[in-house]
Amino acid sequence: MCRLSLFRSPTCPACPPRSGSASAISSSLSTCCTPKLLTEQQAGRFLYSAFGTRIQGDAPPPAQGPDTFNTANTNAIEHAGRLLALWEGGSAFELDPKDLSTVGPVTWRDDFQRAPFSAHPKLDAHGHLWNFGTFGSRIIVWHIDPQGRLADVQVGESPYPGGMVHDMAITARHIVLPLPPVKLDFNRLAGGAAREQAFEFQKQEPLRILVMRKDDIKQRRVFELPAQMMFHVGNAYERTDGAVALTFVGAKDHRSLVHNAVAVMSGHNTQSGLSSTQSVVLDMKSGRATVEALGDAVEFPRVDPRRIGLSARYLLSASSWLPRTARQGQLFHGIQLRDLQSGRLDRYDYGEHMVAEEHLVVPKAGRTDERDAWLVGTTFDARRQATLVNVLDARHVADGPVAQAALPYWLPLGFHGNFTAA
Protein backbone atom coordinates (compact mmCIF):
# COMPACT_ATOMS: atom_id res chain seq x y z
CA MET A 1 0.00 0.00 0.00
CA CYS A 2 1.53 3.23 -1.12
CA ARG A 3 0.64 5.51 1.79
CA LEU A 4 2.40 8.82 1.82
CA SER A 5 6.15 8.72 2.32
CA LEU A 6 6.45 6.48 5.36
CA PHE A 7 10.21 6.86 5.82
CA ARG A 8 12.57 9.80 5.70
CA SER A 9 14.70 9.97 2.61
CA PRO A 10 18.44 9.58 3.14
CA THR A 11 18.99 12.20 0.42
CA CYS A 12 16.45 14.74 1.65
CA PRO A 13 18.22 18.01 2.62
CA ALA A 14 15.60 18.72 5.29
CA CYS A 15 16.12 15.41 7.04
CA PRO A 16 18.77 14.97 9.74
CA PRO A 17 21.72 12.61 9.10
CA ARG A 18 21.07 9.06 10.19
CA SER A 19 23.06 6.21 11.49
CA GLY A 20 22.29 2.83 12.93
CA SER A 21 20.47 -0.26 11.80
CA ALA A 22 17.88 -0.57 9.11
CA SER A 23 15.22 -1.09 11.77
CA ALA A 24 16.12 2.23 13.34
CA ILE A 25 15.92 3.94 9.97
CA SER A 26 12.56 2.41 9.11
CA SER A 27 10.97 3.69 12.29
CA SER A 28 11.47 7.33 11.29
CA LEU A 29 8.23 8.91 10.00
CA SER A 30 8.51 11.37 7.14
CA THR A 31 6.72 13.72 4.80
CA CYS A 32 7.53 14.92 1.31
CA CYS A 33 10.19 17.64 1.24
CA THR A 34 8.15 20.53 -0.11
CA PRO A 35 9.26 24.19 -0.11
CA LYS A 36 7.08 24.69 2.98
CA LEU A 37 8.98 22.01 4.90
CA LEU A 38 12.39 23.20 3.72
CA THR A 39 11.65 26.84 4.59
CA GLU A 40 10.41 25.94 8.05
CA GLN A 41 13.34 23.57 8.65
CA GLN A 42 15.75 26.39 7.80
CA ALA A 43 13.87 28.83 10.05
CA GLY A 44 13.78 26.34 12.90
CA ARG A 45 10.06 26.87 13.50
CA PHE A 46 6.66 26.61 11.86
CA LEU A 47 5.92 29.62 9.66
CA TYR A 48 2.72 29.03 7.71
CA SER A 49 -0.71 28.31 9.15
CA ALA A 50 -2.53 25.32 7.71
CA PHE A 51 -5.83 23.53 8.13
CA GLY A 52 -6.30 22.86 11.84
CA THR A 53 -3.10 24.66 12.83
CA ARG A 54 -2.75 28.43 13.27
CA ILE A 55 0.80 29.67 13.71
CA GLN A 56 1.31 32.79 15.83
CA GLY A 57 4.36 35.04 15.76
CA ASP A 58 6.25 37.14 13.24
CA ALA A 59 4.95 37.36 9.69
CA PRO A 60 6.27 34.53 7.50
CA PRO A 61 8.18 35.13 4.26
CA PRO A 62 5.94 36.24 1.36
CA ALA A 63 4.16 33.44 -0.49
CA GLN A 64 5.51 32.57 -3.91
CA GLY A 65 2.35 30.81 -5.02
CA PRO A 66 0.31 27.86 -3.76
CA ASP A 67 3.36 25.61 -3.36
CA THR A 68 4.53 27.87 -0.53
CA PHE A 69 1.81 26.17 1.56
CA ASN A 70 1.88 22.77 -0.16
CA THR A 71 2.18 19.93 2.36
CA ALA A 72 1.85 17.14 -0.27
CA ASN A 73 0.40 14.88 2.43
CA THR A 74 -3.22 14.09 1.55
CA ASN A 75 -2.85 11.20 -0.90
CA ALA A 76 -0.28 9.27 -2.90
CA ILE A 77 -0.54 7.29 -6.12
CA GLU A 78 2.02 5.54 -8.30
CA HIS A 79 1.55 6.10 -12.03
CA ALA A 80 3.83 5.34 -14.96
CA GLY A 81 6.69 4.49 -12.60
CA ARG A 82 6.41 7.72 -10.63
CA LEU A 83 5.10 8.11 -7.09
CA LEU A 84 3.03 11.31 -6.77
CA ALA A 85 2.44 12.92 -3.37
CA LEU A 86 -0.67 15.09 -3.53
CA TRP A 87 -2.29 18.01 -1.76
CA GLU A 88 -5.47 20.00 -2.36
CA GLY A 89 -4.26 23.17 -3.99
CA GLY A 90 -0.77 22.94 -5.47
CA SER A 91 1.63 20.87 -7.53
CA ALA A 92 1.99 17.12 -7.38
CA PHE A 93 5.36 16.23 -5.84
CA GLU A 94 7.27 13.32 -7.29
CA LEU A 95 8.96 10.80 -4.99
CA ASP A 96 11.33 8.03 -5.96
CA PRO A 97 9.43 4.75 -5.37
CA LYS A 98 12.69 2.94 -4.52
CA ASP A 99 13.61 4.98 -1.44
CA LEU A 100 10.88 7.66 -1.16
CA SER A 101 13.36 10.46 -1.71
CA THR A 102 11.82 13.68 -2.99
CA VAL A 103 12.42 14.40 -6.69
CA GLY A 104 10.47 17.66 -6.67
CA PRO A 105 7.32 19.37 -7.95
CA VAL A 106 5.87 18.12 -11.21
CA THR A 107 5.39 20.70 -13.96
CA TRP A 108 3.10 19.14 -16.54
CA ARG A 109 3.39 22.19 -18.83
CA ASP A 110 5.48 25.34 -18.39
CA ASP A 111 2.53 27.74 -18.59
CA PHE A 112 0.71 25.70 -15.92
CA GLN A 113 3.56 25.67 -13.42
CA ARG A 114 2.28 25.38 -9.81
CA ALA A 115 -1.33 25.09 -11.02
CA PRO A 116 -3.46 22.99 -8.63
CA PHE A 117 -3.33 19.23 -9.20
CA SER A 118 -5.74 17.95 -6.57
CA ALA A 119 -5.41 15.07 -4.13
CA HIS A 120 -8.05 12.73 -5.57
CA PRO A 121 -7.13 11.80 -9.15
CA LYS A 122 -8.84 8.86 -10.79
CA LEU A 123 -6.91 6.16 -12.64
CA ASP A 124 -9.00 4.31 -15.22
CA ALA A 125 -8.65 0.69 -16.30
CA HIS A 126 -6.57 1.70 -19.33
CA GLY A 127 -3.94 3.57 -17.29
CA HIS A 128 -5.12 7.12 -17.95
CA LEU A 129 -4.94 9.44 -14.94
CA TRP A 130 -7.60 12.16 -14.64
CA ASN A 131 -7.56 15.01 -12.15
CA PHE A 132 -8.87 18.51 -11.49
CA GLY A 133 -7.76 21.69 -9.82
CA THR A 134 -9.64 24.83 -8.79
CA PHE A 135 -8.61 28.44 -8.31
CA GLY A 136 -11.10 31.28 -7.93
CA SER A 137 -13.71 30.99 -10.66
CA ARG A 138 -11.70 28.50 -12.75
CA ILE A 139 -11.58 24.72 -12.96
CA ILE A 140 -8.65 22.83 -14.49
CA VAL A 141 -9.07 19.33 -15.88
CA TRP A 142 -5.90 17.27 -16.31
CA HIS A 143 -5.44 14.17 -18.48
CA ILE A 144 -2.19 12.24 -18.02
CA ASP A 145 -1.61 9.37 -20.45
CA PRO A 146 -0.49 5.83 -19.44
CA GLN A 147 3.15 6.80 -20.09
CA GLY A 148 2.92 9.64 -17.55
CA ARG A 149 2.83 12.43 -20.18
CA LEU A 150 0.37 15.29 -20.28
CA ALA A 151 -2.23 14.36 -22.89
CA ASP A 152 -4.43 17.41 -22.35
CA VAL A 153 -5.23 20.21 -19.93
CA GLN A 154 -8.42 22.28 -20.12
CA VAL A 155 -9.63 25.30 -18.18
CA GLY A 156 -13.29 26.19 -17.67
CA GLU A 157 -15.55 28.31 -15.48
CA SER A 158 -16.88 27.07 -12.16
CA PRO A 159 -20.66 27.21 -11.62
CA TYR A 160 -19.87 27.98 -7.96
CA PRO A 161 -16.82 30.29 -7.95
CA GLY A 162 -14.65 30.00 -4.87
CA GLY A 163 -16.36 26.87 -3.64
CA MET A 164 -14.48 24.09 -1.87
CA VAL A 165 -14.07 21.02 -4.11
CA HIS A 166 -12.34 17.93 -2.72
CA ASP A 167 -13.00 14.87 -4.89
CA MET A 168 -14.18 13.86 -8.35
CA ALA A 169 -15.43 10.88 -10.33
CA ILE A 170 -15.07 9.80 -13.94
CA THR A 171 -17.14 7.79 -16.38
CA ALA A 172 -16.18 6.51 -19.81
CA ARG A 173 -16.94 9.94 -21.33
CA HIS A 174 -17.36 12.41 -18.48
CA ILE A 175 -15.76 14.15 -15.53
CA VAL A 176 -18.15 14.34 -12.57
CA LEU A 177 -17.30 17.11 -10.11
CA PRO A 178 -19.44 17.70 -6.98
CA LEU A 179 -19.37 21.27 -5.63
CA PRO A 180 -20.81 21.42 -2.09
CA PRO A 181 -22.14 24.81 -0.88
CA VAL A 182 -19.06 25.62 1.18
CA LYS A 183 -16.78 28.65 0.78
CA LEU A 184 -13.86 30.12 2.69
CA ASP A 185 -14.78 33.47 4.26
CA PHE A 186 -11.64 35.53 3.69
CA ASN A 187 -12.93 38.40 5.86
CA ARG A 188 -13.29 36.01 8.79
CA LEU A 189 -9.86 34.60 8.03
CA ALA A 190 -8.32 38.09 7.95
CA GLY A 191 -9.99 38.81 11.28
CA GLY A 192 -7.97 36.06 12.94
CA ALA A 193 -10.23 33.02 12.65
CA ALA A 194 -8.57 29.65 12.21
CA ARG A 195 -8.80 28.41 8.64
CA GLU A 196 -11.20 25.57 9.43
CA GLN A 197 -13.51 27.98 11.30
CA ALA A 198 -13.58 30.37 8.34
CA PHE A 199 -15.49 27.93 6.13
CA GLU A 200 -19.10 28.94 5.60
CA PHE A 201 -21.85 26.43 4.79
CA GLN A 202 -24.32 28.24 2.54
CA LYS A 203 -27.44 26.20 3.25
CA GLN A 204 -29.47 28.29 0.82
CA GLU A 205 -27.27 27.01 -2.01
CA PRO A 206 -27.62 23.54 -3.60
CA LEU A 207 -25.05 20.81 -3.87
CA ARG A 208 -24.05 21.21 -7.51
CA ILE A 209 -22.86 18.28 -9.60
CA LEU A 210 -20.92 19.47 -12.64
CA VAL A 211 -20.75 16.87 -15.42
CA MET A 212 -18.28 17.71 -18.21
CA ARG A 213 -17.27 15.89 -21.37
CA LYS A 214 -13.70 14.62 -21.07
CA ASP A 215 -12.83 15.71 -24.60
CA ASP A 216 -14.42 19.16 -24.25
CA ILE A 217 -15.28 20.41 -20.77
CA LYS A 218 -17.32 23.26 -22.26
CA GLN A 219 -19.93 20.61 -23.07
CA ARG A 220 -21.43 20.30 -19.62
CA ARG A 221 -24.50 20.08 -17.42
CA VAL A 222 -24.97 21.32 -13.87
CA PHE A 223 -27.31 19.34 -11.62
CA GLU A 224 -28.68 20.71 -8.35
CA LEU A 225 -29.32 18.57 -5.28
CA PRO A 226 -30.49 19.65 -1.81
CA ALA A 227 -27.74 21.38 0.16
CA GLN A 228 -25.30 18.96 1.78
CA MET A 229 -21.61 18.59 2.47
CA MET A 230 -19.51 15.97 0.72
CA PHE A 231 -15.86 15.01 0.80
CA HIS A 232 -15.52 11.76 -1.12
CA VAL A 233 -17.10 10.01 -4.08
CA GLY A 234 -17.47 6.27 -4.46
CA ASN A 235 -17.76 5.84 -8.21
CA ALA A 236 -19.66 6.95 -11.32
CA TYR A 237 -20.63 5.27 -14.58
CA GLU A 238 -22.88 5.73 -17.60
CA ARG A 239 -26.07 3.70 -17.63
CA THR A 240 -27.50 2.16 -20.78
CA ASP A 241 -30.18 4.89 -20.88
CA GLY A 242 -27.49 7.58 -21.03
CA ALA A 243 -27.90 8.75 -17.43
CA VAL A 244 -24.90 9.03 -15.10
CA ALA A 245 -25.05 7.06 -11.85
CA LEU A 246 -22.97 8.38 -8.96
CA THR A 247 -22.29 7.31 -5.39
CA PHE A 248 -20.80 9.63 -2.79
CA VAL A 249 -20.75 10.23 0.96
CA GLY A 250 -22.89 13.19 2.00
CA ALA A 251 -23.76 15.00 5.23
CA LYS A 252 -26.44 17.52 6.10
CA ASP A 253 -23.93 20.23 7.01
CA HIS A 254 -20.19 20.92 7.22
CA ARG A 255 -19.49 19.78 10.79
CA SER A 256 -17.31 17.04 9.33
CA LEU A 257 -15.11 19.80 7.90
CA VAL A 258 -14.98 22.34 10.73
CA HIS A 259 -15.14 19.91 13.65
CA ASN A 260 -14.34 16.29 12.82
CA ALA A 261 -11.31 16.82 10.60
CA VAL A 262 -9.68 19.05 13.22
CA ALA A 263 -10.74 16.82 16.12
CA VAL A 264 -9.00 13.84 14.54
CA MET A 265 -5.76 15.81 14.25
CA SER A 266 -5.97 17.10 17.84
CA GLY A 267 -6.92 13.79 19.43
CA HIS A 268 -10.49 14.70 20.37
CA ASN A 269 -13.71 12.77 19.77
CA THR A 270 -15.57 13.28 16.52
CA GLN A 271 -19.27 13.25 15.77
CA SER A 272 -19.98 10.03 13.90
CA GLY A 273 -23.18 9.28 12.04
CA LEU A 274 -23.00 12.60 10.20
CA SER A 275 -22.31 11.19 6.73
CA SER A 276 -23.95 8.43 4.72
CA THR A 277 -23.81 6.82 1.29
CA GLN A 278 -25.85 8.66 -1.34
CA SER A 279 -26.90 7.10 -4.64
CA VAL A 280 -27.67 9.60 -7.39
CA VAL A 281 -28.96 9.32 -10.95
CA LEU A 282 -28.20 12.28 -13.23
CA ASP A 283 -30.45 12.41 -16.31
CA MET A 284 -28.26 13.94 -19.01
CA LYS A 285 -31.27 14.59 -21.27
CA SER A 286 -33.65 16.33 -18.88
CA GLY A 287 -31.16 17.76 -16.40
CA ARG A 288 -33.06 16.19 -13.49
CA ALA A 289 -31.33 14.49 -10.58
CA THR A 290 -32.72 11.93 -8.15
CA VAL A 291 -30.94 11.03 -4.93
CA GLU A 292 -31.40 8.24 -2.40
CA ALA A 293 -29.74 8.21 1.03
CA LEU A 294 -28.80 4.64 1.93
CA GLY A 295 -29.02 5.12 5.70
CA ASP A 296 -25.56 4.15 6.92
CA ALA A 297 -22.74 5.98 8.70
CA VAL A 298 -19.61 5.83 6.56
CA GLU A 299 -16.62 7.56 4.99
CA PHE A 300 -13.71 6.73 2.65
CA PRO A 301 -15.71 4.88 -0.06
CA ARG A 302 -13.69 2.72 -2.49
CA VAL A 303 -14.48 0.32 -5.36
CA ASP A 304 -12.51 -2.29 -7.27
CA PRO A 305 -9.87 -0.16 -9.08
CA ARG A 306 -10.62 -2.01 -12.33
CA ARG A 307 -14.20 -0.67 -12.14
CA ILE A 308 -13.41 3.03 -11.70
CA GLY A 309 -15.62 4.86 -14.19
CA LEU A 310 -17.55 1.65 -14.93
CA SER A 311 -20.45 -0.07 -13.21
CA ALA A 312 -19.23 -1.48 -9.88
CA ARG A 313 -21.44 -3.73 -7.76
CA TYR A 314 -19.61 -3.43 -4.43
CA LEU A 315 -18.74 -0.32 -2.42
CA LEU A 316 -16.28 -0.56 0.49
CA SER A 317 -16.31 2.01 3.32
CA ALA A 318 -15.14 2.63 6.85
CA SER A 319 -18.30 2.44 8.92
CA SER A 320 -19.95 2.78 12.32
CA TRP A 321 -23.18 1.05 13.30
CA LEU A 322 -23.11 0.47 17.07
CA PRO A 323 -24.92 2.90 19.39
CA ARG A 324 -22.58 5.57 20.75
CA THR A 325 -23.15 4.31 24.29
CA ALA A 326 -21.68 0.94 23.27
CA ARG A 327 -18.31 2.22 22.18
CA GLN A 328 -15.59 4.64 23.23
CA GLY A 329 -15.46 7.84 21.22
CA GLN A 330 -17.34 8.34 18.00
CA LEU A 331 -14.94 7.28 15.25
CA PHE A 332 -15.54 4.46 12.77
CA HIS A 333 -15.06 1.06 14.39
CA GLY A 334 -15.47 -1.25 11.38
CA ILE A 335 -15.72 -1.67 7.65
CA GLN A 336 -18.63 -2.57 5.41
CA LEU A 337 -18.88 -3.95 1.89
CA ARG A 338 -22.20 -2.87 0.35
CA ASP A 339 -23.80 -4.79 -2.51
CA LEU A 340 -25.32 -1.93 -4.50
CA GLN A 341 -27.66 -4.32 -6.34
CA SER A 342 -29.17 -6.24 -3.42
CA GLY A 343 -28.44 -3.79 -0.57
CA ARG A 344 -26.70 -6.53 1.46
CA LEU A 345 -24.05 -5.33 3.92
CA ASP A 346 -21.05 -7.49 4.85
CA ARG A 347 -19.41 -6.00 7.94
CA TYR A 348 -16.53 -6.55 10.31
CA ASP A 349 -16.31 -4.83 13.69
CA TYR A 350 -12.71 -4.19 14.76
CA GLY A 351 -13.85 -3.41 18.31
CA GLU A 352 -14.72 -0.45 20.50
CA HIS A 353 -11.07 0.40 21.14
CA MET A 354 -10.21 0.50 17.42
CA VAL A 355 -10.43 3.28 14.84
CA ALA A 356 -11.07 2.01 11.31
CA GLU A 357 -9.48 4.02 8.52
CA GLU A 358 -9.66 3.87 4.72
CA HIS A 359 -9.47 0.35 3.28
CA LEU A 360 -8.56 -0.44 -0.32
CA VAL A 361 -9.84 -3.09 -2.71
CA VAL A 362 -6.90 -5.10 -4.07
CA PRO A 363 -7.93 -7.63 -6.77
CA LYS A 364 -6.46 -11.10 -6.44
CA ALA A 365 -4.05 -11.98 -9.24
CA GLY A 366 -5.69 -13.71 -12.17
CA ARG A 367 -9.25 -13.20 -10.88
CA THR A 368 -11.98 -11.03 -12.44
CA ASP A 369 -14.90 -11.09 -9.97
CA GLU A 370 -15.15 -8.05 -7.69
CA ARG A 371 -15.43 -10.29 -4.62
CA ASP A 372 -12.16 -12.04 -5.49
CA ALA A 373 -10.16 -9.35 -3.76
CA TRP A 374 -8.23 -8.48 -0.63
CA LEU A 375 -9.36 -5.56 1.51
CA VAL A 376 -6.28 -3.78 2.82
CA GLY A 377 -6.38 -0.92 5.30
CA THR A 378 -5.20 0.53 8.59
CA THR A 379 -6.70 0.76 12.05
CA PHE A 380 -5.52 2.51 15.19
CA ASP A 381 -5.51 0.37 18.32
CA ALA A 382 -6.08 2.68 21.30
CA ARG A 383 -5.12 -0.01 23.82
CA ARG A 384 -1.82 -0.90 22.16
CA GLN A 385 -1.25 2.69 20.98
CA ALA A 386 -0.28 1.31 17.57
CA THR A 387 -1.30 1.50 13.91
CA LEU A 388 -2.18 -1.88 12.43
CA VAL A 389 -2.26 -2.92 8.77
CA ASN A 390 -5.06 -5.40 8.08
CA VAL A 391 -5.81 -7.77 5.19
CA LEU A 392 -9.31 -9.22 4.84
CA ASP A 393 -10.89 -11.47 2.21
CA ALA A 394 -13.74 -9.71 0.37
CA ARG A 395 -15.70 -12.96 0.24
CA HIS A 396 -15.47 -13.42 4.03
CA VAL A 397 -15.52 -9.91 5.49
CA ALA A 398 -17.20 -10.97 8.74
CA ASP A 399 -14.32 -13.37 9.49
CA GLY A 400 -12.00 -10.40 9.99
CA PRO A 401 -8.32 -10.09 9.08
CA VAL A 402 -6.49 -13.05 7.58
CA ALA A 403 -3.28 -11.14 8.24
CA GLN A 404 -2.40 -8.24 10.50
CA ALA A 405 0.82 -6.36 11.23
CA ALA A 406 1.63 -3.67 13.80
CA LEU A 407 3.69 -0.73 12.55
CA PRO A 408 6.52 0.68 14.70
CA TYR A 409 4.95 4.15 14.50
CA TRP A 410 1.51 5.77 14.38
CA LEU A 411 0.06 6.90 11.08
CA PRO A 412 -1.96 10.14 11.17
CA LEU A 413 -5.70 9.63 10.77
CA GLY A 414 -7.83 10.83 7.91
CA PHE A 415 -5.42 10.56 4.98
CA HIS A 416 -5.45 8.39 1.86
CA GLY A 417 -3.36 5.96 -0.13
CA ASN A 418 -3.35 3.54 -3.05
CA PHE A 419 -2.01 0.05 -3.54
CA THR A 420 0.94 -0.75 -5.80
CA ALA A 421 2.23 -4.28 -6.22
CA ALA A 422 5.90 -4.69 -5.30
Image: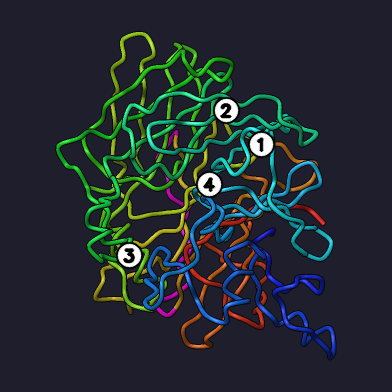
Viewport quadrant of the N terminus: bottom right
Q: Residue at x 66, y 36 (%)?
A: 306
Q: Earlier in the sequence, mark 2 or mark 4?
A: 4
Residue at 52% in and 61% down: 415
Q: Does the CB distance between marks 1 and 4 fall below 8 Å?
A: no
- Magenta residues span 341-353
Residue identified by numbered label 2:
310
- At numbered mark 4, what does the secondary structure look like: helix, strand or loop? strand
Nearest to the eye among marks 3 and 4: give it. Answer: 3
Q: Residue at x 42, y 16 (%)?
A: 220
User: Which of the two discs, 3 and 2, labels the residue nearer the N terminus?
Assistant: 3
Give the mark, 3 or 4, whose residue is nearer the N terminus: 3
Mark 2 and mark 1: span between their CA atoms? 8 Å
Q: Amino acid at mark 4?
A: Arg
Name the element at disc 1: helix
Estimate the spatial distance between the alpha carbons at disc 3 and disc 4, rounded to whole Å.
20 Å
User: Which callout, 3 or 2, points to the residue nearer the camera?
Assistant: 3
Residue to which mark 3 is pinned = 260
Frontmost residue, 5 versus 16 = 16
Q: Position of residue 53 (x, y in %)?
A: 39, 71
Residue on which disc 4 sits: 302
Amino acid carrying mark 2 in the image: Leu
Q: How many marks?
A: 4
Provide the secondary structure element on which disc 3 rests. Answer: helix
Question: Where residue 171 appears, x then y in whole percent?
Answer: 54, 25
Q: Which residue is mark 1?
A: 306
Residue drawn at 85 percent across, 88 percent down: 21
Q: Nearer the viewer, residue 89 or 233?
A: 89
